[in-house]
Image (spheres, rainbow, N blue to C red):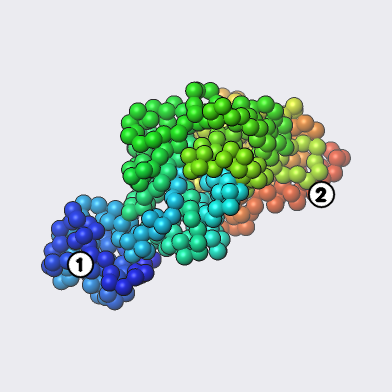
Amino acid sequence: MQLLIHQPGGIHLRELLAGGQIVGADDIQVHACSCDWRDCRPCDVYVAMVGTDHDGHDHVDLAVTRGAVAVVAERVLPTRVPTCIVSDSREAYGRICQQLAGQPDQQLRTVGITGTLGKTSTAVLIGAMLHAAGQSAGTIHSLEHWDGHVRRVPLSTTPKPAALACGLARMVANGCGHAVVEVSSEALAYRHVAGLQFDAAVLTNLRRDHMDLHGSVKNYHRAKRRLFKHLKRRGFVVVNVDDPESHALIADLDVPVMTFGMRQNAELRATITERCPSEQTFLLTAGSATVPVRTRVVGDPHVYNCMAAAALGLVLGLDLATVVRGLESVESIPGRLERLECGQDFSVFVDQARTADALAATLHTARQVTSGRVICVFGPSFWQASAVRARLGRVAQRSADIPVITPAHPGYEKPLQMAHDVLDGVAEQNKFHVIPDRAKAIRWALAEARPGDTVVIAGKGEETHQISGVSRLPMDDREIARHWLYGYHPDPVRVKSTAILPMRLGAPWN
């Protein structure tokens, strides 16, 4: 993506990248930049970055041929155009993008949200809370990118630097006063938020995730903590003190911290008073004030997300009544324990849960609101390692009465091999049902449900496609379930005659 400047005069790299060494000129003036040689246009500055499967430094000559007038790189290159040598070209690229966009973070109150679980839900709740306060806020999270005028379907959770800078600039142009940004560990590792400063950083929790990217839990946590280095001078942090890893890092922070929790001593606390499949009520306590909050989204994770949003709102100066009004206005969050109400006499939830931690939390909530059995449709995606798949199996064995394995996104993998990987982590293999076709697995689980049961459909959430081979096939778990539920017939013979029978591992698939 090419990024053009918003004001005349350009930016000067000698000033912006003071630690860099400029070769071939006294200074480099930037009016537009690109990190992909194929996007380069005449007068661009090309930023060479090392990727996972390529090195942008190898393409400098191609970028110059397309019109690049200068290069930002991490080493000296044999090129005829001026070069700025920096220690981290990803960091430099992010800073250049934000400057070219007019440094929009200086005209917005910016909130960055990171953590293993709950980032998107917390971002949605914060947006609703600010709306309830009559304040305009742009939001960037995995469900949508909203710039105050247009809603866009995101290609990634946190956009790459050029798209992120442009999105924030549009928020400013459209009159937004706040920007709420979900910041993934990948975005932090690859410096997507370089050059961007936040008024507040929210840490929901720290668990184990994305080992394929980070290599170790330590590296993953280190990437998450990088968000705190992007705080403005008077910035603050909101932390979940019930989460041990999050609590432990408070001692390392030299900025104001607002804590929330249900078990540990915290500045904002919550106490659950009532919970059923369709709603829950909890008391929110801040100082000497206590107010009830009633939400249509159930489960402890949602209470924690509400507390994270509320803590942020209170520090931003919102009153408690406004905070509660905003939290209660969110009746559902797509793919996050999303309840399907189609007149059936059992509960159905669709949830994104892809990791063992997320699935455990979802099934724990389901168990709390279920008088009968918990039936869980779940399965891995092709990009998940075998160890991750085995952990999913252990969670399902422990927390579901009827676990049904079916792939979320098979890619080029064979669904039965994916099921084998899941079953490698369990001792009671005969408890599991394997149905390779996901749509049939969902329909079978629904047909199996009885009054008082709960069916959890996990792994894809709000996604409306399934990746099979190189194709993105239309598939929405929610629509498959709704279609079956609206055609629900209580006659068990009729239901069984149209359902796909479960396959035990080792039995032939007919």
Look at the picture and state if 24 lies above or below 443: below
Query: What secondary structure is marked by label 1?
Result: loop
C-alpha separation, residue under disc 1 versus residue under disc 2: 66 Å
Please, which residue is most extreme toward the right here?
491
The quadrant in which residue 304 appears is top right
The quadrant in which residue 292 appears is top right
Residue at coordinates 33% horizontally, 44% vertically from top-left?
A: 233
Circles 1 and 2, Cβ within 8 Å, touching? The answer is no
Taking the image as shown, residue 183 lies to the left or right of residue 405, namely left
* Towards the viewer: 420 or 5: 5
Query: What secondary structure is marked by label 2?
Result: loop
Residue 144 position in % (x across, y down): 55, 55
| Residue 465 appears in the rendering | yes
The residue at which mark 1 appears reads as 28
Residue at coordinates 35% horizontally, 46% vertically from top-left?
A: 232
First of labels 1, 2 by sequence position: 1
How many numbered callouts? 2
| Quarter placement of the C terminus | top right
Residue 443 position in % (x across, y down): 72, 44
The residue at which mark 2 appears reads as 487
